[in-house]
């Protein structure tokens, strides 16, 4: 067994049992459908903000809930983020829990596949990007980039393929403002057909909000939210589903969770549940 790098994280067995009912099956089996097991997970402030402003890297999770997030990564085949998060954070998107591939265990067993939603293929990654550094060190997998561009830049494609990643062209919807909108059922079917039996959606704000719209929220098998004891204030990147209205035009609750469990992690609180579907 190889020694674990200095940035390895510990997540004790005593904390794992609580999460088990909200995670994909341990045997790696998939739901009996064309869709993978899909978990939505993110950290938020008391005023439902993910970040101080668009593109601003904002640390919310404490050390215990941060380790929990990495454990969740080890239990999913893939991690989905939006291109805005990739550009702003230069993320690693790997699992740093001791005993996972590259962290005290040879090979890449337990490392999730990063999946970046980049409709226009604008992410200007390079050989120095953290994702590829981790690939070279044997501590992570290269990303799959989901894009509406049929023929991405050849140099970018060559770099991706050098490390075992690739572009995956998919059709995307257009909003009334001209923005690209992910067709979540099509995307999730595509990911499962490519071998990802479970995925976790980590961010950013636009990706999370699009998945929480009434049309798509039924696709979620599990919701795990870390709530930090802080207010970020006005101007933050807020996660809030579109409002629903009843037959008389009155505003009603956009969404609600069921089978809810709360668990304290240091100063944070972790909320686990499932989407309660409305008639």
Image (spheres, rainbow, N blue to C red):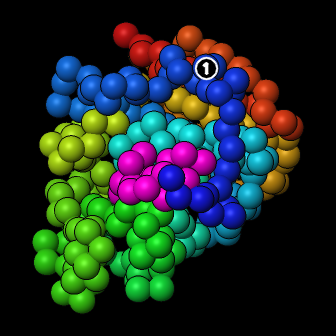
Q: Residue at x 48, y 42 (%)?
A: 74
Q: Residue at x 28, y 36 (%)?
A: 197
Residue 245, image x and y in percent? Answer: 48, 24
Q: Is residue 231 magenta?
A: no
Residue ranking furthest to the bottom: 155
State the residue in front, 250 or 168: 168
Residue 175, image x and y in percent? Answer: 32, 55
- Is 83 rendered above or below residue 237? below
Q: How many marks?
A: 1
Tell me where residue 11 sits by quadrant: top right
Q: Residue at x 74, y 58 (%)?
A: 59
| 76 sits to left or right of 271 | left
| 185 sits to left or right of 122 | left
State the residue in front, 151 or 164: 164
- Is 204 rendered above or below residue 244? below
State the residue in front, 138 or 88: 138
State the residue in front, 224 or 206: 224
Residue 31, image x and y in percent? Answer: 26, 23
Query: What residue is disc 1 on?
Result: 17
> Predominant secondary structure in magenta?
loop
Point out the stretch of residues depicted in magenta.
98-116
Badge 1 density bin: few <14, some 14–19, many ≥20, Cα 10 Å:
few
Residue 154, image x and y in percent? Answer: 19, 87
Task: Note whether residue 167 is visible.
Answer: yes
Tell me where residue 143 sits by quadrant: bottom left
Q: Residue at x 77, y 48 (%)?
A: 63
- Is 95 rendered above or below residue 74? below
| 160 sits to left or right of 141 | left
């Amino acid at each position: 067994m190889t020694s674990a790098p200095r940035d390895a994280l510990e997540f004790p067995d005593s904390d794992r049992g609580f999460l088990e009912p909200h995670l994909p099956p341990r045997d790696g089996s998939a739901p009996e459908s064309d869709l993978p097991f899909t978990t939505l997970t993110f950290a938020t402030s008391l005023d439902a903000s993910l970040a101080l402003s668009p593109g601003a890297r904002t640390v919310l999770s404490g050390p215990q809930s941060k380790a929990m997030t990495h454990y969740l990564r080890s239990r999913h085949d893939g991690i989905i983020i939006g291109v805005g998060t990739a550009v702003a954070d230069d993320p690693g998107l790997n699992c740093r829990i001791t005993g996972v591939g590259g962290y005290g265990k040879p090979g890449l067993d337990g490392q999730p596949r990063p999946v970046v939603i980049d409709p226009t293929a604008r992410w200007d990654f390079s050989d120095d990007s953290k994702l590829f550094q981790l690939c070279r060190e044997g501590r992570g997998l290269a990303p799959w980039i989901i894009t509406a561009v049929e023929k991405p830049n050849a140099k970018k494609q060559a770099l991706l393929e050098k490390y075992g990643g690739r572009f995956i062209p998919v059709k995307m919807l257009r909003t009334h403002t001209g923005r690209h909108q992910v067709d979540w059922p099509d995307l999730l079917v595509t990911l499962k057909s490519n071998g990802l039996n479970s995925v976790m959606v980590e961010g950013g704000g636009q990706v999370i909000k699009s998945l929480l719209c009434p049309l798509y929220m039924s696709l979620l098998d599990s919701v795990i939210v870390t709530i930090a004891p802080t207010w970020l204030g006005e101007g933050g990147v807020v996660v809030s589903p579109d409002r629903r209205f009843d037959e008389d035009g009155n505003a009603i609750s956009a969404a609600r969770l069921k089978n809810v469990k709360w668990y304290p992690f240091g100063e944070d609180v972790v909320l686990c549940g499932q989407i309660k579907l409305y008639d």
